[in-house]
Image (tube, helix red, strand yellow):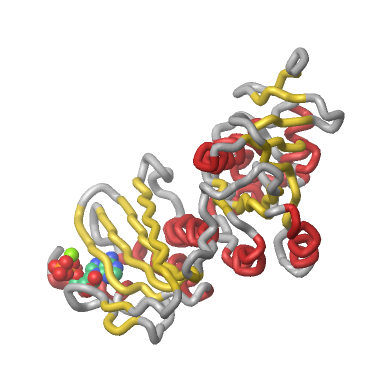
Amino acid sequence: MSGSEFQLINHYFSRLGVDRTDVLLGVGDDCALLQVPEGQVLAVSIDTLVEGVHFFPGVDPESLGHKALAVNLSDLAAMGADPAWITLALTLPRVDEQWLAAFSSGFAALAKRFQLQLVGGDTTRGPLTISVQVHGFVASGKALRRDRAKPGDLIYVSGTLGDAGLALLAQKGAYDPGADLAALQIRLDRPEPRIGTSQSVRDLATGAIDISDGLLADLGHICEQSRVGAVINLSNIPLSDPVRVYVEKQQDWTIPLSAGDDYELCLIVPARHQAEIEARAQGLDVGLSLIGQIEVGETIRCLDENGTQIQIGSGGYDHFPSS
Ligand code: ADP
Ligand code: MG
């Protein structure tokens, strides 16, 4: 980067987010100096978005700035952590001021909303690639791990599932959701990290995962790491109207169960907390739905409204003969 290019980048990224008192030294030196509060541990996660792999070339840079940070915050929410700091590694094919202004504005708006400070990063030239690392705090011993689920625990999910997947299907020309397309597209382009939901109920949960690869795959990670199975009641899966219409029309559960990108939370909650979590859910701006239960075993069983086990395939669903 030339001196003037570096100054330009500096203009957008030297003071991004809020000024936090736990940042002893932010952008500008060889390292940032950061103070983790006593009694808390550091939760760290990184995600990389590569143009042409994770997003389409020419995508709206403001939404991209939002999404690059949102998917990382979603990981903090799934760990039960409070967001604090960000580092950002940007690889840019050229220095395009309009692009930088829009990208940083989408990124900064979300950073401010969740009281984050950008404390450092790296800038290089090459194919457009965005790596965001987030750092958060969680009280020692209170993190929502994937390996703590026990038979009998309840499984909750936030929001609705399948909206982003349906938007992607529509983008590929494989389905026409009509007037609902705009709302679905927002779910895909501007995911909302469920930090508030996590903060409100995390003390009742023992585990969580954010749904980035689809409910069955992500709940599958919890089952695998906890060495348990699960049973899901399909009639309790929370669906938006357009996804409900799609499932009924196409007789296809793969969009809500196996499509990713919704970034909702899947929470594991001991059954003794059922009344308390459902009472707290009343006060949240996003719903929590009880969709099933952890059980002994090593598979995830999906039951329809009659209690009949359904096989979720790639192109629809079939009834099991008898099992
Ligand atoms: P170094 O050569 O020591 O790696 P750099 O020239 O890469 O230093 O960066 C100088 C300062 O600017 C560092 O504090 C670094 O964290 C920060 N920085 C560089 N690029 C970014 C970026 N994209 N976002 C935030 N901070 C950045
Ligand atoms: Mg550097």
Across and down, in percent, residue 241 comes to: 78, 45
In the rendered image, the residue lying farthest to the bottom is 21
Residue shown at the point (74%, 44%) measured from the top left: 291
Vertical order, 111 against 25 (above or below)? above
Across and down, in percent, residue 191 comes to: 56, 55
Vertical order, 12 against 319 (above or below)? below
Residue shown at the point (46%, 66%) measured from the top left: 106
Q: Quadrant of the N terminus?
A: bottom left
Decide if residue 114 is on the left or right side of residue 273. Answer: left
Q: Nearer the viewer, residue 152 or 254?
A: 152
Decide if residue 184 is on the left or right side of residue 306. Answer: left
Residue 95 sits in quarter = bottom left
Where ligand 2 lies, by image quadrant? Answer: bottom left
Residue shown at the point (27%, 66%) measured from the top left: 121
Q: Nearer the viewer, residue 289 or 154?
A: 154
Residue 101 sits in quarter = bottom left
* Residue 62 is at least partly visible in this image: no
The mark tally for this picture is 0
Vertical order, 224 against 134 (above or below)? above
In the rendered image, the residue lying farthest to the left is 2
Vertical order, 230 against 312 (above or below)? below
In the rendered image, the residue lying farthest to the right is 306
Across and down, in percent, residue 117 comes to: 39, 76
Across and down, in percent, residue 76 comes to: 49, 61
Q: Quadrant of the C terminus?
A: top right
* Residue 91 is at least partly visible in this image: yes
Residue shown at the point (80%, 65%) measured from the top left: 279
Decide if residue 130 is on the left or right side of residue 295. Answer: left
